[in-house]
Each structure stands twice: as structure tokens, then as C-alpha cells.
Image (cartoon, helix red, strand yellow):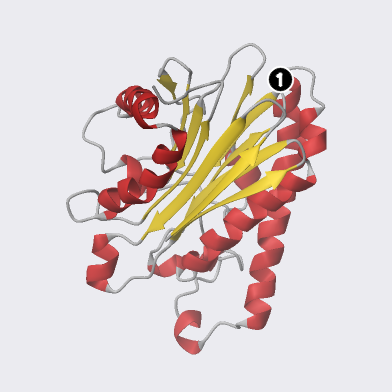
Amino acid sequence: MSVEQAARDASRDWQVSTAVVRGAAHELTGLPLQDAAGYREISGGLALAVADGHGNQRHFRSARGSELAVRAGLGAAAELAATLAASQQPADLIVATRAKLVPALLHRWQRAVQEDLAERPLEAGELRLVQREDQVTVPYGSTLLLAVLTSHWLLLGQIGDGDIVVVGPDGTATAPVPGDPLLDGQRTTSLCQADAADSFRLAAADLGSGPVAAVLLATDGFGNAQTAEPWYPLFGADLLRLSQQHGPDWIRAQLPGWVARCASAEGSGDDAAAALMIAGPPGWSPS
């Protein structure tokens, strides 16, 4: 499944593509697709999000939880776009995000979970999976990766595993969001935990001093399929080369196929979701 959009900010075109593919292992075992991705135009810019539902028995509605997570992240970004854009320094943007955006998106997600439960109360089989200490959001547990582009800032936020990669005009790729020592390949931080706000990791970039040519958000099913470690430097170089050869529109059209290969039995076998924002002229242009 893929959704492709194009958007424009004040100075350039941005080609945006999102793709979500059910993993081969999930198809084999009958598990549902538990990843989600989305895109939204906001005041003066763009917002992209991907999410990965946890999928084990305790989080038995995480497929729905990841959908609600993407919706909550994009909604909060749209609501607070003007506030974020008004920041004067990267540190100010981080403070505003921590104080306003993170609480807003958590509130949106928690409210959406409660509404979903009101519409679809837990069935007897589901109730047996709930542990006594669980909050109502635990069955919907999900990660969330969010990118917010304004006229001057690029804001990145993440809870849980997955990768956010920023590519410069020369093809240099970085992963600017700080790591999380709690992630060990078996456990992840989550929107459903009581202290979720404290587990968000943030990064901000001033587009005036450092142009950005592409931003990729991907769940762990994408990154785990890569053979190189770290994989994103090669990704950035390849993205630059392919964009120079074919143009950003071609790159956008290829993303669903790339994600499908990652989710295949030859890749990670896991669900994979990605959202890619790539700059058109004057950043990169076909040769």
C-alpha cells in the first residue's frame, strides 16, 4: 500500500511518498499489518510520520494503535505549526516541542484510543490478555517517528525504535535523533508507557544554515533489512546518485518497491513502513 503526494513550501518543491508493506513473516503466521505511515501539509510546510505497533499478545490492538499514532502526530504538528515556526533558535524549538507538541500528540493519541475502545469494547478473548496493572492504552502500544518541516526549521521527534535519516545536498546522510539506551532489539519505548513524554528524543536543524535534500522516516523492518552497518551513509549516497540520474519524481515512485523488498522473506520479513521527503529544484535535478 502506498500514498504519494507532492507539496510546495515557500522556496522549492518537495516530493513526498509513503509506503507500508506487510512483512513476509506476518503473512506466514497470519498476523495483521502493524505499521503505518502518513503525510500532511501544514501551515508553511510539511509533516511526515511512521509508526510501528508492537504486535505481541499484550499489545493486541497495536495495528490500530499505529494508525492512531500517525494521525495524532500529524494532527499535533498541524495544530502547532505556527508556534514551532516562531522559534528563534534550535534550542527554543526543542523546548517548544517538549512543552507543547509532545503533550499535544500524546493527548490526541490517548483520546483516540479511548474513543476506539468506546466504539469497540474489548472482547472476552482480549480481556484475558490484559494484565492487572495495564493502562487502557497498553493494547494499542506503538512507536512514533515524526518530521515537521517549516519555512526555516526541520524538527525531528521519535519514541521507540526505527530510523530517521537526513540527507544533505552532497549525499551525506546523518541520523541526528539521539539514540535510546533502552532499545536492545527486544524492547522498545512506547506511546503506551506512563512516562512516554520523557522517552521522546528530539533534534532540530536550521534550514537557513544547513540545507536538507531529503528526509527518510522508517520503521525497524526497513533498517533491519539493510546489509551495511550503519546503512544510512550508503543510502544517502545512492539516493543522490539515483536522483541525479532520474529525478525526485522517479525516486518517489520507487519507494513502495524498496519497502516491499525490505519486508520480504529476503529482507527483514517484518512489516516495513517509510515516509520519504525529497527536494526538487534547486536542490537536486535530473542530469
Residue at 39% x, 65% y is: 33
Is residue 195 shown to the viewer in this render? no
Q: Most extreme residue toward the front, as rendered?
A: 287
Count numbered badges in the picture: 1
Residue at 44% x, 67% y is: 58
Instruction: Say what secondary structure mark 1 lies in.
Output: helix
- Figure check: 161 above or below 64: above
Q: Residues within 10 Å of mark 1 (few under 14, many from 20)?
A: few
Q: Could you say which is closer to the camera, residue 153 or residue 11?
A: 11
In the rendered image, residue 270, in percent from the top left (x then y), is placed at 30, 55
**Where's the N terminus, which quadrant?**
bottom left
Label 1 sits on residue: 91
Residue at 38% x, 70% y is: 32
In the rendered image, residue 41, in percent from the top left (x then y), is placed at 68, 45
Q: Is residue 53 left or right of residue 84?
A: left
Which residue type does callout 1 highlight? Ala
Q: Most extreme residue toward the left, as rendered?
A: 266
In the rendered image, residue 22, in percent from the top left (x then y), is placed at 34, 62
Q: Could you say which is closer to the camera, residue 186 or residue 3?
A: 3
In the rendered image, residue 61, in percent from the top left (x then y), is placed at 49, 70
Q: Could you say which is closer to the camera, residue 138 or residue 233?
A: 233
Q: Most extreme residue toward the bottom, as rendered?
A: 124
- Figure check: 220 above or below 71: above
Is residue 203 shown to the viewer in this render? yes
**Where's the C terminus, which quadrant?**
top left
- Figure check: 22 above or below 159: below
Residue at 53% x, 67% y is: 64
